[in-house]
Amino acid sequence: MEASTINGKFIGFLQNNSIDCISCKEKVVLNLGNKDLGKCKDCNLIQIVSSCATQWFMRILVQSSTNPSEQRKLSLFNKQVEELVALMNLNKPVSQSCAERTNLHGSEA
Ligand SMILES: [Zn+2]
């Protein structure tokens, strides 16, 4: 895997998360009536959302500090998001309720 370095600042980001089925690891859709429960899109298992693993995804736009017209788009998957959050000493990218709304809006895209 190639690596490159850019020094700059975040000028925008988009984040999303998905919930994995505890049985088959496919995507779980939240139950609109009861947010504690979700249903797997693949095996239809209804499950308690808090016992499922959440996969985070972020897309970041970085502006170069040496050349402001240079911008890079970076995609971060779950492991990188966790590393970034740890690096920045944050708890989670957003509150859980906000994440759920993000997920609901993005789930049919
Ligand atoms: Zn499943």
Image (cartoon, grey):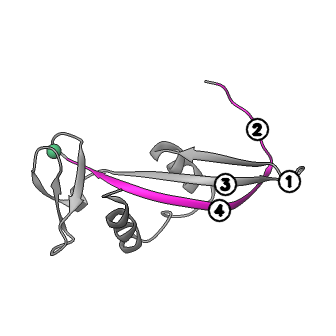
Q: Is residue 61 above or below residue 78?
A: below
Q: Marks 1/4: CA distance?
A: 15 Å
Q: Earlier in the sequence, mark 2 or mark 3?
A: 2
Which residue appears at 19% of the width and 46% of the height?
Answer: 22
Residue 5 numbered tag: 2
Label 1 with label 4: CB-CB less than 8 Å: no
Residue 12 numbered tag: 4
Which residue appears at 21% of the width and 47% of the height?
Answer: 21
Q: Amino acid at mark 4?
A: Gly
Residue 65 numbered tag: 1
Q: Nearer the viewer, mark 2 or mark 4?
A: 4
At mark 4, the secondary structure is strand
Q: Amino acid at mark 3?
A: Leu
Q: Indicate the position of residue 26 as horizontal and vertical percent values.
A: 23, 43
At mark 2, the secondary structure is loop
Q: Marks 2/3: CA distance?
A: 14 Å
The residue to which callout 3 is attached is 61
Q: Earlier in the sequence, mark 1 or mark 4?
A: 4
Q: Amino acid at mark 1?
A: Ser
Within the magenta stretch, is there residue 6? yes
Q: Amino acid at mark 2?
A: Thr
Badge 2 crowding class, 10 Å Cα cut-off, few under 14, some 14 to 19, many 20 or more, is few
